[in-house]
Structure formats: C-alpha cells, structure tokens
Amino acid sequence: MSAILIATLICFLVPAYVYVGYPLVLWVLSSLKSLEEVAMQPDDKLPTVTLVVSCFNEADVIEEKLNNVMELDYPEDRLSVLVVSDGSTDGTDEIVERFAGQGVQLIRQEGRLGKTMGLNLAMESVRSDITVFSDANAMYAPDAVRQLVRHFQRPDVGYVVGAALYTDGEAGASAQNEGLYWRYELAIKTMESRLSSVVGGDGAIYAIRSALWQPLDQKDINDFVNPLQIVLKGYRGVFEPKAQCFEETAGEFDKEIARKERIVNRSIRGLFRVRGVMNPFKTGLFSFMVISHKLLRWLIPLFLALGGFGSLALSLFGLTVFKLIALGGVLTLGLAAIGHFSSHKNALPIWISFPYYFVAVNWYAVRGILRAIQGETQVTWDSARQGREGR
C-alpha cells in the first residue's frame, strides 16, 4: 500500500505545484529582483519595424485590421506592413491590395501551407531592425508597437511579447472561463519576464530582432518555437503588458477546446525539437520555467488520471481522505458530463462550466499529445472565430 500511497501523492503534488506552487515560486523570486524601467524613445531614435500580418480567408476583418494599423502611433517612414495570405479564397487579397497606396505589401502563398510557412516566406522580404507578428483579428492599441520596441534598447533582449486581451470576457460561460485562464497566464508572464524570460510568444502580438529569425519547420508553432530558438542564442524575452491588442475568444466551448488541442499538439513537438532550452547548463533558470510552465502542465492529465486511480485503490483500504478525493473526482467528472451533454453550453452556470472546461481542456491536451507521439501535426486549421476560417 505504501508504494501506491507515495505514487498517488506525487501524482497530486505535480498539478498542485504547476497551478499553485510554480506561480508562488515566481512571485517570491521575482519580488527579490528590482524592476528595470525602459524609457520610450523619441521618433528619430526609433528602430525600423515591419509588421507582419498572417491571414487565411479573413475578408470579414482584414479591412478593419489594416485601418487599425494605419492609426498606429509610429513614424510612417519607419514602419512597413506585410500581409501574408495563405492562399485565401474569399476576397481577402483584393481588400489588402486596396491598401497598396498606403504602404501595405501583399505576399500570397499558394497551396495553403500554413501560417508558419507563410512567415518563412514573408521574412525573406524583411529588412527592418524589428519584426512584429500579428493576426488579422488582433486590433492594436495606438502605442502598442512603441511599447514593444522600446525594450530592444537593451542589447540582451531578443523578443518582446505584448498582452492580447479579450473584449468579450463576460459574454458567456466559454468566454468567462477563457478570460479567467488568460488573466492567470498574464500574471505568470509578468513574473517570468521580471525574473528571466517570458516562456513563449503570442501570435497576436510579439516582436523580435529581425536578425534573430531562423526559418521554421512547417510543423512548428511559430510563436512558441521561435522565442525558444532566440533564448538558445543567448537572448532573453520580455513581457510588456502595456503593449496591448484586443480580440474576441472563440465564444463557444467546443471551438475553444479544439484550439487547445491544436496548440498542445504543435507545441510539445516544437519543445522537443529545441529541447536544449530544457538544459539548465544552456539556459539556466529558463529551463526550470519552460518545464514548469509548459511541459509539466501538458502532462497534468496523466498525473490526475493516475492519482484518481490511486485514490480509488487507497479508498478500499479505508483511508478517509482518499475516499473524499475519489468522491470529489467522481463529482467533477459528473458535472463535466452534464456540461458536455448540455445543448446550451455557453449559458452554463460557473459551477458546471468550470469543471467542464477544466476536464475538456485536459482531455483534449491528451489528444494533442497522443497525436504528436503518433507523428500527426496539424499545420493548417479552421479558425476558432465564428464564421471565419483560420490559418
């Protein structure tokens, strides 16, 4: 029984560490480090920037996006705009071409090869000091680019990640759960950045030194693998919460959960492709952060499942605490099942929607991992946004 007890306790301690212990460790360590402020630069000192916007069939939002770009508070002579279209078929390209007179360049990729290959193609044309990556549905605050690039005054900074905020965070159960999760993530990013480097980027808003770009494999998820490559080159990544963009959540549980599967599927493969970032002799403290924030979190479903089976076994020995844990697990799965079979998922009360969201996200993370182990990686996908297709 002792072996089962020890194994079960470990299986529960790992998720507890990932969700609570790791943020607490970050909070303690980051609080011991002073915050270094970086001043905004005058116009004549700003670096040249290329804003790369990725899209596939984004006719519904691309005009709004480009109008948003035109309103950015950044000198026109230092800002270039590239829109890379992954074989769009809905008139997206024609809309983009209407902005050619305003300095917007369209690069069309034939054959729908995916966002990552589109970025490889676009980067062949980039000659600026800094490249900012964005999505078609991400609307930038006027000073977003200035907030990103000011950190590159420090020579050790290789990438800067902005804050993608949801505009519909209270619109329904799905958006509420996703919004809660994302606020938790932003807090972790802030502490990681202060302590060492923020783990990964954000495809909606992140910037790199253009010279550090390294062509990616088609199966790579660019906003995760690209920052890891930069860390391996000896640079660090900063999170800047004042560099903001705004977008909507998927709005529906099923679409949001499917997006999680795709992200885990591509990210776990990408992490092992640049596995050197998990070597403390190469990346120091960052190795601890990427393992804690990413790898262990993706493996949480496995630990929870084993811990659940261990609790059932230990409850047979009459251990009350494990009887309660087993009962809590059954209750959580029961509430998740109610959410799963509900025909109105977006109107679920929080005491049902949260268990459903938690169980479903972890289950789909398992699916993503299994697909990666089997060699399946999704390089194109349908957008999670209502009525639109994705990259």
Image (tube, rainbow, N blue to C red):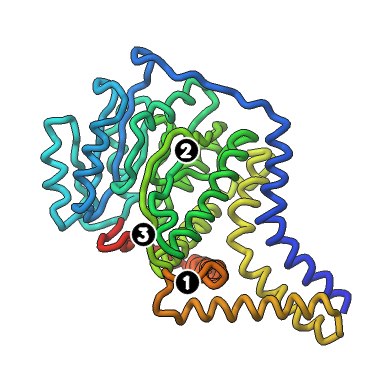
Q: Amino acid at mark 2?
A: Val
Q: Which of these two is toward me, 328 or 274?
A: 328
Residue highlighted by disc 2: 161
| Residue 42 placement (x, y as % from top left) | 38, 14
Query: Residue 143 is drawn in which quadrant?
Result: top left
Query: Residue 308 is drawn in which quadrant?
Result: bottom right
Mark nearest the camera among 1 and 3 is 1
- Precedes in sequence: disc 2 or disc 1: 2
Q: Secondary structure at mark 2?
A: strand
| Residue 170 placement (x, y as % from top left) | 44, 56
| Residue 332 placement (x, y as % from top left) | 62, 75
Given contact means CB atoms under 8 Å apart, are the residues at marks 1 and 3 in contact? no
Give the Cα separation between the discs numbered 2 and 1.
33 Å
Name which residue lies at 40% across and 46% down.
203
Q: Amino acid at mark 3?
A: Val
Residue that extends furthest to the right in the rendered view of this protein: 2
Residue highlighted by disc 1: 348
In-image side of 92 versus 388 (left or right): left
Q: Amino acid at mark 1?
A: Leu
Name which residue lies at 39% across and 66% down.
252
Q: Secondary structure at mark 1?
A: loop
Q: Which of these two is toward me, 25 or 232?
A: 25
Is residue 390 shown above or below 11? above
In-image side of 133 versus 161 (left or right): left
Q: Which of these two is toward me, 312 or 228?
A: 312
Quarter holding the N terminus is: bottom right
Badge 2 density bin: few <14, some 14–19, many ≥20, Cα 10 Å: many
Residue highlighted by disc 3: 379
Mark nearest the camera among 2 and 1 is 1
* Residue 323 in view in this figure: yes
